Structure formats: C-alpha cells, structure tokens
Image (cartoon, rainbow, N blue to C red):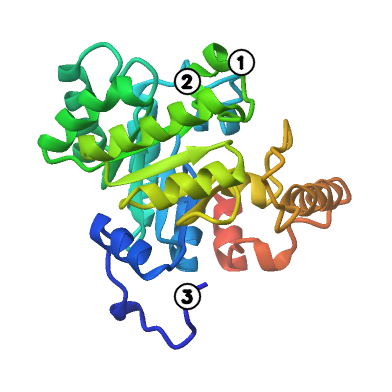
Amino acid sequence: MTSPDEKPHERKKVTPLDLLTKKRRGEKIVRLTCYDYPMALLADRAGVDAILVGDSCGMVVAGLKNTVPVTMEEMIYHCKAVSRAVQYAMIIGDLPFLSYQTDIRDAIFNAGRLLKEGGADVVKLEGGQEFAPTVKAISRAGIPVVGHIGITPQSASMSGGFKVQGTDTSTARKLIEDAKALEAAGAFMLTLEGTPDRLAELICRELTIPVTTMGAGPNTDGQTINMYDILGLFDKFTPKFVKKYANLAEVITLALQHYKQEVEQGIYPGAEHTYHMKEEVLKEILEK
C-alpha cells in the first residue's frame, strides 16, 4: 500500500530507471497482472510499481485453454483499458504468440503498436538467447523490453508443459545463460517464472537489471502475481506460488444470489431506486 501520508501529487510515473534504482537499493519491486479498467484502477491506487497486461488474458478472462490464440488486437484492447485507468504504475504490454517470432521487423512494428495504440510503457516477450537479437532490435528502436524465461506459456508444450524449469544442471545453466544474453541485448528487466528458489537467487545476483519472479521464491528483486488469482476470482487452477488474499468469488456469488432473491420477491427495486413521475404529469397524460 502507499503511505497514508503520501499525497497524490508526490507520486510520479514509474520508469525503467526507477526499477533499476530499487534493485540497487535492495527495495522490492511489486508487479501485478490485470487486463481491465476497474482492476487496473485499484492496482494503481494500491501503489504497485508495475502492471503487466499479460496474454494470460486469453485464459483468465476469455476462457481459452492457453495463451497461443491471443491476438495483437486483443492485447491492444486490454492495454488500452488498463492505460485509461493508470496514472503511476508502469504498464507492461505482453507481445502475443507470432507477433515477434516471425522476424525482427514484425517484432519492432508490433512492439510499437502496444505503445502507440495500446498505451503501454514497455513490452515483454518470452524466450532466451534465441531472442536476444529481437530484444536488441526493439530496444534500439527506443522501446524498453522486459525479458521472460523459465516457464514460457507460449511455448510450454515444448518444455513439458507448465512445469518448474531449471531443476537439473544443464537446464539451470541454460537459464543463467539466457538471462545474461537478454541483459546484454538490452532488456531492462527480466521476468523469471517457475524456477527453484536458489537458481532464481543466483540469477538475480548475476544480473545488474531487476529480476521479478513468479513462483521462484522470495530472494529476488520483486514479485509478480495475477490479481484474479490473489483475489480468488480465477478457480480453474491455482499455482503453488499463489497466495489468496481474498475470496471475492464467494462474496460476488452471495451478492448475486441476494440480488436474484430480491428481484423474485419484488423487493428490488425499491422506492429509493426508482424514478418517480409527478401526479399532475401522469394525470395529464391519462386525460389525453
């Protein structure tokens, strides 16, 4: 939460430099994932550093089985919704599947669309060393890039599904090399998802850029978590690393059941919820 003594005008838009400064000072970075105006408004009011508009919107709000079908148009739509709500947090737009894998020109163009049309501040893409040239090209075009390694949902089927990555020597070394390659290519921040805690801590120490994690333990530069998960609004599955801070699904269901009951019993709408016509107006209408 933001300090109760902090005045709105004292806050400013979070930049990549701000997050690098937080790493240097040993201050934790707080990121949330959300996709819509109401949630983004609340996240921004809570004072989080960054909001990831993830392609996980396909699974969480559209009911898809995975993130692969999500399009650029859908990502731009969700980025727009979030950007209308946010004043302070950094908005990270996710580049969806096939928006950057085909060639570097497409990658730069689509990254630019997330900023120009969607209102994102920076972009995120999945992949390690093989995408270092893409990260470098996007960065050179003036677009800040967040890397993403470990569990990479767009290519999860190639790595055995949504399973912890880097559990043996060879895959752990590969992740360390991937992280260093992305930093060298110009990524200003790294997302590390689903790795053992000691490996995540090691990668965090090896890099000068911030490393925020999902399911990689506490000893990193910060955490990212999905708002729908921690608020108890998404129940298809719950990753081990998710802590539920509320059960809003139950609260909302009870509220809707109460609404249904009052409508059926004629309690709602009451007089206080109704627009009333003056008697003389009604009389005049009836007389005609």
Q: Tell me how far mark 2 sits from mark 1, CA to CA.
A: 12 Å
Establish if 18 lies above or below 80. below
Q: Which residue is mark 1?
A: 160
* Residue 24: mark: none
Specify whether 222 is left or right of 257. left
Q: Tell me how far mark 1 sits from mark 3, CA to CA.
A: 40 Å
- SS for tag 1? loop
Amino acid at pointer 1:
Gly
Task: Work out whether residue 51 or residue 172 is closer to the camera in this orientation and state it.
Answer: 172
- Residue at 61% x, 18% y: name it: 161
- Residue at 58% x, 67% y: name it: 278
Q: Tell me how far mark 3 sits from mark 2, CA to CA.
A: 34 Å
- Residue at 55% x, 27% y: name it: 169
Q: Which residue is mark 2?
A: 154
Q: Which residue is mark 3?
A: 2
Amino acid at pointer 2:
Gln
- SS for tag 3? loop
Residue furthest out toward the bottom: 5
